[in-house]
Image (cartoon, rainbow, N blue to C red):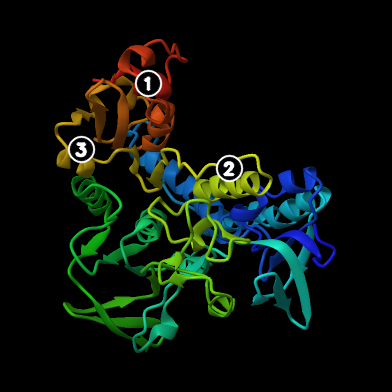
């Protein structure tokens, strides 16, 4: 490191796009700092995936007990206050634990908002810090509808600390956050309505599968309003009236789940020549911006692969390896699995149905009813479906599943998709019986 720089590498943001890779830098003798303006760990541990799945766990248990065909009987109810207290007690330990681990690895922490003065200098409050290289890992924040009454809307961060179950909850948007919140709150006892601007929920997934998920949630009591736009919100005492293009409806709590926006604001990126647009920071195949010493990782990136925590982890580790000269090749993303944590789950990885249908000369699809497998009845599963996608050399290249255990099935099949296993090779995996992993590998079409 040149003596003119305070640090070798500075990460702007202390989430998964930073802390999963950074310790390898200090282990190699580099001087490293994190600049964080909020809680260490970023969205996922504090206000995202971790908090969501902790709150979802008791609603999943409740759903399974209600599906037990009367074997588990009695009153089915959920103590939301205790569930929220449990969630908070678990996540409160994440930020200090991550910070302590990074500090033990030799990483310095600077708290405040960073903005670039030039390609090697940032300002935080009244101090400046220099570095040979920067990694922008600032993530995203919730989009907010710009309508009259927008002050009455809540975002996902608010929702994950909702103090009580509302009588009537309206969710605007039907992506991951919207449907997961709908599944949790309907099971917890709210009357949930989901408003879609167009026809399809979950555009990242096949239309048939997303429609089937919506039908399952509808059966549980969720109401879907399609081709509807919210125009304004008015307060009526302790409740609200939502005016839409298809009529008005009442609510006690309104979740704005209309998307997320990359955190590129107030970084002075224009001043230093770093390109970005509404989808995020633009990088090359090495995750470098127009300024080669400035990288970007995680959800702040403009990219085609899913913006997920494991993706940020992969990018963080890649950038560190590139900085250290250990990986000089362009980033090569693996198959990235993704799931919607509703009941039932929807999960997928690899080649999609849309790709397979568009290229019938390259792919074959096998469609399956998950209840054809006896093991699915063990935990009182409801009907589900799965599509396996093979290439013409009989290698498994894609899977999508709707079921109560879809995420576990996709995880079990992911190595095959990533490494190109054939059916014959997969049959050589003698897994634990009975288990969902065995089931997944025993029903390959």
Question: Marks 2 and 1: which is nearer the front?
Answer: 2
Question: Marks 3 and 2: which is nearer the front?
Answer: 2
Relative to 128, say whether 325 is above or below. above
Label 2 crowd bin: few (<14), some (14–19), many (20+), radius 10 Å: few
Relative to 334, say whether 149 is above or below. below
User: Total label count?
Assistant: 3
Q: Position of residue 343 (x, y in %)?
A: 35, 45
Q: Which residue is mark 2?
A: 328
Label 3 sits on a secondary structure element that is helix
Instruction: Using the image as rendered, state which of residue 149 and residue 399 is in the foreground.
Output: 399
Work out which quarter of the rendered image holds the N terminus and state it.
bottom right
Q: Position of residue 108 (x, y in %)?
A: 80, 60
| Residue drawn where x is 33% and y is 34% of the image | 70
Instruction: Using the image as rendered, state which of residue 12 and residue 429 is in the foreground.
Output: 12
Q: Quadrant of residue 385?
A: top left
Instruction: Using the image as rendered, state which of residue 213 and residue 88 is in the foreground.
Output: 213
- Whether residue 69 can be seen here: no
Q: Which residue is mark 1?
A: 421
Q: Is residue 2 left or right of residue 208?
A: right
Relative to 175, say whether 254 is above or below. below
> What number is the disc on residue 356?
3
| Residue drawn where x is 73% and y is 47% of the image | 25
């Amino acid at each position: 490191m040149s003596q003119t720089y305070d640090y070798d590498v500075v990460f702007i943001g202390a989430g998964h796009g930073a802390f999963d890779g950074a310790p390898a830098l200090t282990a190699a003798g580099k001087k490293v700092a994190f600049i964080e303006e909020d809680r260490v760990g970023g969205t996922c541990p504090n206000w995202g995936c971790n908090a969501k799945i902790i709150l979802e766990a008791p609603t999943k248990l409740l759903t399974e007990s209600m599906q037990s065909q009367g074997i588990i009987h009695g009153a089915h109810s959920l103590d939301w206050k205790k569930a929220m207290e449990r969630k908070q007690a678990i996540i409160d330990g994440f930020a200090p634990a991550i910070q302590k681990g990074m500090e033990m690895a030799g990483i310095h922490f600077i708290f405040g908002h960073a903005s670039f003065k030039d390609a090697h200098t940032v300002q935080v409050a009244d101090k400046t810090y220099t570095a040979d290289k920067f990694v922008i890992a600032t993530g995203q924040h919730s989009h907010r509808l710009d309508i009259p009454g927008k002050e009455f809307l809540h975002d996902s961060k608010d929702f994950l600390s909702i103090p009580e179950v509302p009588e009537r909850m309206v969710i605007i948007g039907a992506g991951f956050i919207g449907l997961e919140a709908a599944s949790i709150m309907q099971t917890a006892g709210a009357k949930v309505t989901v408003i879609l601007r167009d026809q399809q929920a979950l555009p990242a997934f096949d239309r048939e599968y997303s429609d089937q998920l919506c039908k399952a949630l509808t059966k549980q009591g969720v109401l879907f309003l399609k081709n509807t736009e919210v125009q304004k919100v008015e307060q009526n005492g302790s409740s609200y009236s939502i005016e839409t293009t298809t009529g008005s409806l009442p609510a006690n709590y309104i979740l704005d789940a209309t998307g997320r926006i990359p955190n590129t604001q107030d970084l002075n990126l224009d001043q230093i020549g770093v390109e970005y647009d509404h989808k995020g920071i633009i990088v090359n195949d090495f995750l470098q911006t127009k300024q080669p010493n400035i990288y970007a990782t995680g959800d702040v990136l403009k990219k085609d692969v899913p913006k997920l925590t494991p993706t940020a982890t992969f990018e963080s580790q890649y950038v560190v390896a590139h900085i250290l000269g250990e990986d000089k090749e362009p980033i090569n993303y693996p198959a990235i699995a993704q799931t919607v944590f509703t009941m039932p789950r929807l999960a997928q990885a690899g080649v999609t149905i849309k790709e397979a249908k568009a290229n019938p000369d390259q792919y074959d699809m096998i469609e399956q009813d998950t209840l054809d497998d006896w093991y699915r009845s063990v935990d009182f599963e409801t009907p589900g479906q799965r599509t396996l996608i093979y290439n013409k050399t009989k290698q498994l290249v894609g899977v999508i599943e709707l079921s109560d255990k879809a995420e576990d099935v996709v995880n079990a099949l992911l190595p095959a998709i990533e490494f190109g296993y054939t059916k014959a090779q997969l049959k050589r995996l003698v897994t634990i019986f009975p288990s969902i992993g065995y089931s997944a590998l025993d029903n390959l079409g």
